[in-house]
Amino acid sequence: MNEATILDGTAGAAIPETAEPRRSLFPFVFRGNGGEYFRIWIVNLLLTIVTFGIYSAWAKVRRLRYFYGNTLLDGHSFEYHGRPLAILKGRLIVVGLYLGFLALAQVMPLAILALLPLVIFGLPWVVMRSRLFQMRMSSYRNLRFNFEGTYSGALGAFVGWYLLAAITAGILYPAWVRKRVQYTLDNSVYGTQPFTFNSGNGVYFKFCYITAGLSLVVYVVAIFAVMSLPNLKGLFGHGVPPTWLEIAGALGVAGWLLILVGAVAAFSIAAYYQASFINASFGGVQIGSNYILSELKVAPLMWIYVTNLLGIVFTLGLFYPWAKVRQTRYQLENMQVDSDGKLGAFTAGTAGATSAVGEEAGDFFDVDFGL
Amino acid sequence: MIAGRYFDGHSAAPAEARIDFGADGVVRVLGLAEPVAVPLGQVAISDRVGNITRRVSFPGGAVFETFENDAMDRVLEAHQVKRATALVHWLEARWPVALGSLVAVALVSFAFLRWGVPALADWTARVLPTATDRAIGSGTLQVLDRVAFSASDLTQERQDELRARFALMTRDLTDGHEYELELRHGDAIGANAFALPSGIVVMTDELVGLSKTDDELVAVLAHEIGHVRGRHALRQLLQAAGVSAIALALLGDVSSISGLLSAAPALLHAKHSRDFEREADVFAKQWLRQHRIAESNFDAILCRMSAEHPGAGDMDYFSSHPATSERAHCESGKPRAKPQGKNPD
């Protein structure tokens, strides 16, 4: 794609004012490519290794800048502004907590239980700070995003609704999923314009229940089919659990075919869930008089999942950059913005507030936990 | 002159503009209603990543954006603006560098997992007190008694005899472990012996039945003592933690495939586990030599245990134990490879 197509007609300070706003569709465009990202990925991986992980914060910033910067809407790219030092600080804290947790789990396993309330009440806080960092570090057309979610909002969405889902034996699980998405999206702001999240509970209940139903059917059928394989029956019931090698040998051609069918079924369900989730979540976003349309399809997404997995397995992970680019491209290029034609009409928040954030972010609490 | 777009910092509306880095050290944005001129030292120019838009940020939040990365690089070079991250882009832009990095990543990862992790784990184990060993294995025997073992069928005299022999073996060991021999009926586990990190060694009736002389049992027990003395359980745990930590560091951002690659630590676990078996074998044979007991006792009982449990072939890579053919010289022809988990642990 050359520059002429990137710079479109709406550029320029003068935006035509018409009596009746003409609506138009702006597709998201992803310009990244696998080979380019592979080089960035492998060089940064090596630098991360030789610096004993320190460089990983810089690598993360370069990775996110690559993906944000190659995401275009209306000819303008997104930009990631996170600073490596803030991220490094966050990572060191997380690694420290993780090591402490491991040590404690080994020496005093029961003490872990005492930490549970800390984790339960700490997690919403981490989510809130992480969303805040993520949004504030993102910009489009030189306007920053912002996040106005509160701690109590996160506590309700992530813990309160989880408890409701748990005590109703999962019946309210879809509402929990929606609450989490709503917390993230409804509290986001672009410039001075807050997001509105319009997807109702119905669509979440529908795809969650369909996913659960399909999974249950596949699971039950798979169990019965595998247990009916004649060779496998002999392996169980001797007190000694069979090793994986013994099981693999006993499966035979029929068994492996069965596993293949099962894997395809599982991938289809995963793709169905993912496509539905993204469509319901991003598709429900309204920013001013602009609406995001998300139209991911199950079959292409599943094809991407399966081929990505095979590619990664058979290249011992080297295919990963291409896989990541393919998936990102598919997701983005099936999303567009239905706009009144004035994507340039947004304004920055109170003067200076958005640009000062970069400094604030360096504050201890604005660390990115990489969620 | 480089073409691009200018944002005033207050609105999302772009203005077509050009930027000029003057020889006088002033950066000018041209083509605007009100021209912008700022000293080079006061603007921030974003690092180049791939071919994403390059941003020149002005004080006050205004930004000039351009897709012409190469032109920007030439300007920066002309004005001798140098920064380390330019080198990173130089590296990222070249296939030979990428392929070289790939080889280096593979070699370093291999070397670190092969030698670095065990060395780090051993060092950590030396720092940790023996009390840690007791903490790791506490409760294991109770669980095994519930799910796998039943009480020993051996006579009390025979049990006392074996315990006395074991006590004699461990009397002079001053490594902080409380050595103790437990006898159990192995049931499904069959002829086997294994050590708990605290110093408790469990031996099954079936193994006692399989032995021709008590010296053979002593050889197996010496192997188990080797595990305890070498603090293999603790080291294994530390190595597993090390491998996980590396996987986290390398693949921390790769949530979708890190699950896939979690098989790698399992394979390494088996590899390290075999190293510990060899270490325990060496200890056992050395102990036998010191106490003037024929090393052939060790080979004999190991071969008999293998013969009792015919199973998988020489699946050396996946196995938690080395192949018996590698560990012992069996008398009757080609030694049989040991099936998983049937050698003394």
Image (cartoon, grey):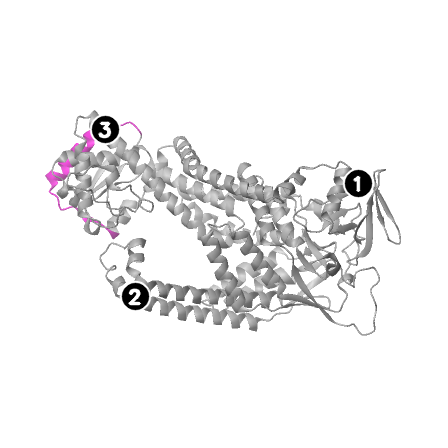
Are discs 3 and 1 less than 8 Å apart at CB?
Answer: no
Q: Find residue A123 and report its horizontal and vertical position in percent.
A: 54, 53
Residue B166 sits in quarter: top left
Q: Amino acid at mark 2?
A: Met
Distance (Cα) linking label 2 and label 3: 49 Å
Along the viewing direction, whichever of A33 and A151 lies nearer the viewer: A33
> Residue at label 2?
A227
Nearer-N-terminus badge (3/1)? 1
Is residue B160 found inside the magenta-colored segment of the image?
A: yes
User: Mark on residue B287?
Assistant: 3
* Nearest to the observer: residue A235 or residue A360: A235
Span colored in magenta: B147-175
Mark 3 Cα within 10 Å, few/some/many (few <14, many 20+)? many
Q: Is residue A271 above or below residue A243?
A: below
Residue drawn at the location 25% of the way across and 37% of the way down: B327
Question: What's the residue at 82%, 56% (across, down)?
Answer: B15
SS state under label 2: helix
**Labels 3 and 1 within one chain:** yes
**Where is B273 relative to A185, above or below?**
above
Q: Quadrant of the C terminus of chain B?
A: top left
The residue marked by circle 1 belongs to what chain?
B
Q: Hey, what amino acid is under mark 3?
A: Trp
